[in-house]
Image (cartoon, rainbow, N blue to C red):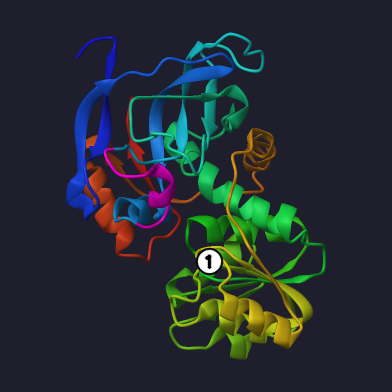
């Protein structure tokens, strides 16, 4: 190993967790407007293991070899020409480049400075790395896309997951009445986060228990028991379904139009300014971050195996640099 190389998790083909291997690769250098960040921790998201297997963002990244990961928390090591918002030594977090490759499962990443923000001061790097992709997805869905207002009724499916637990908190922050679906074991925790009602999806059809909903943030999709289509039954006339995992199929679009509902697909974008706002909410104590388990970089495959099994509370994180 030299100053010109670094450790990174590389996959040479699509497949199961066993395709993820730590290798020595060239260390990147920042271009103008970019920063080089020494990665302390990298968050893991469902899009990671989907992409590893050939779905998710595989169509964007192309054929392997490539390095997965978009969630980063670390320290600025070098700044490129023209960067004025960050300096060497700043602790930052971000979701750079999404959906293009960010190569976050590595010791260093480079990206435009404004795709990062200073990490929440009250969080260590492990918890900060759990935030960007999940929190930005929730923020952009709840705040920017649905424009949730105080007093509205918001239903969040898969509310105990990475995106879900942020969506619950952001909807609560905006003054909404929040209804969350999760297994019964997660209900007490979700109510602590701000859910007004909880529905055990393992025993109850959520559309039978939730009605007159203004906004559904669906984090499950129609691939799993037609969850998006069923969500339409919970909406009030004119209500909005934000369909996140799989977008909006022609069949779902027709069903929404027939029922007099609105539906929109969604994909998260890098947003350093929103991360600054989210950091303030975290530092004020209004928003909490849940990390269920951490894994060292060389156990990325084990982490994927754990995540792909489902039922994760909050996030899984890779520890990269001490």
Q: Residue 264 placed where, x, y %?
A: 66, 66
Instruction: Say which residue label 1 marks.
Output: 219
With respect to residue 11, does 76 lie above or below? above
Residue 70 falls left or right of residue 274: left
Q: Main secondary structure of the magenta part?
A: loop
Residue occupying image coordinates x 53% and y 88%: 205
Q: Nearer the viewer, residue 278 or 264?
A: 264
With respect to residue 308, does 213 lie above or below? below
Q: Using the rendered image of the protein, determine whether residue 45 is visible from the camera's viewpoint.
A: no
Q: Nearer the viewer, residue 289 or 67?
A: 67
Residue occupying image coordinates x 28% and y 49%: 303
Q: Residues within 10 Å of mark 1 (few under 14, many from 20)?
A: many
Mark 1 element type = loop
Residue 58 falls left or right of residue 75: left
> Residue 21 sits in which quadrant?
top left
Residue furthest right in the image: 150
Residue occupying image coordinates x 47% and y 61%: 161
With respect to residue 267, does 215 lie above or below? below
Q: Nearer the viewer, residue 263 or 174?
A: 263
Residue occupying image coordinates x 68% and y 37%: 280
Residue 139 falls left or right of residue 23: right
Q: Residue 86 placed where, x, y %?
A: 61, 17
Q: Residue 276 placed where, x, y %?
A: 66, 34
> Which region of the structure is painted magenta?
55-65
Q: Using the rendered image of the protein, determine whether residue 74 is visible from the camera's viewpoint.
A: yes
Is residue 60 covered in magenta?
Answer: yes
Residue 299 falls left or right of residue 60: left
Is residue 208 covered in magenta?
Answer: no
Q: Residue 143 placed where, x, y %?
A: 73, 54
């Amino acid at each position: 190993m030299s100053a010109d190389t670094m450790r990174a998790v590389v996959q040479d083909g699509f497949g199961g967790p066993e395709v993820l291997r730590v290798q020595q690769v060239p260390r990147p250098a920042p271009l103008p407007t970019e920063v080089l960040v020494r990665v302390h921790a990298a968050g893991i998201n469902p899009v990671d293991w989907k992409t590893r297997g050939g779905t998710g963002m595989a169509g964007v990244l192309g054929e392997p070899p490539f390095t997965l990961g978009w969630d980063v928390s670390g320290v600025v090591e070098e700044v490129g020409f023209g960067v004025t918002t960050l300096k060497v030594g700043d602790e930052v977090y971000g979701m750079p480049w999404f959906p293009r490759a960010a190569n976050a499962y590595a010791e260093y990443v480079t990206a435009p400075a404004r795709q990062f923000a200073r990490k929440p001061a009250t969080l260590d790097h492990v918890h900060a790395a759990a935030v960007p992709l999940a929190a930005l997805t929730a923020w952009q869905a709840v705040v920017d896309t649905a424009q949730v207002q105080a007093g509205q009724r918001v239903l969040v499916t898969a509310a105990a997951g990475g995106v879900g637990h942020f969506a619950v908190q952001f909807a609560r922050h905006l003054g909404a009445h929040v209804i969350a679906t999760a297994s019964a074991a997660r209900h007490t925790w979700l109510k602590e986060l701000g859910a007004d009602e909880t529905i055990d999806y393992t025993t109850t059809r959520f559309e039978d228990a939730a009605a007159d909903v203004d906004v559904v943030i669906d984090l499950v999709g129609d691939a799993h028991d037609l969850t998006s289509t069923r969500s339409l039954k919970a909406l009030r006339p004119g209500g909005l379904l934000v369909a996140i995992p799989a977008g909006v199929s022609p069949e779902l679009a027709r069903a929404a139009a027939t029922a007099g509902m609105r539906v929109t697909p969604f994909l998260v974008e890098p947003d350093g300014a929103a991360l600054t706002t989210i950091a303030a909410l975290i530092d004020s104590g209004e928003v909490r971050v849940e990390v269920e388990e951490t894994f060292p970089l060389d156990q990325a495959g084990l982490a994927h195996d754990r995540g792909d099994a489902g039922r994760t509370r909050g996030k899984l994180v890779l520890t990269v640099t001490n």
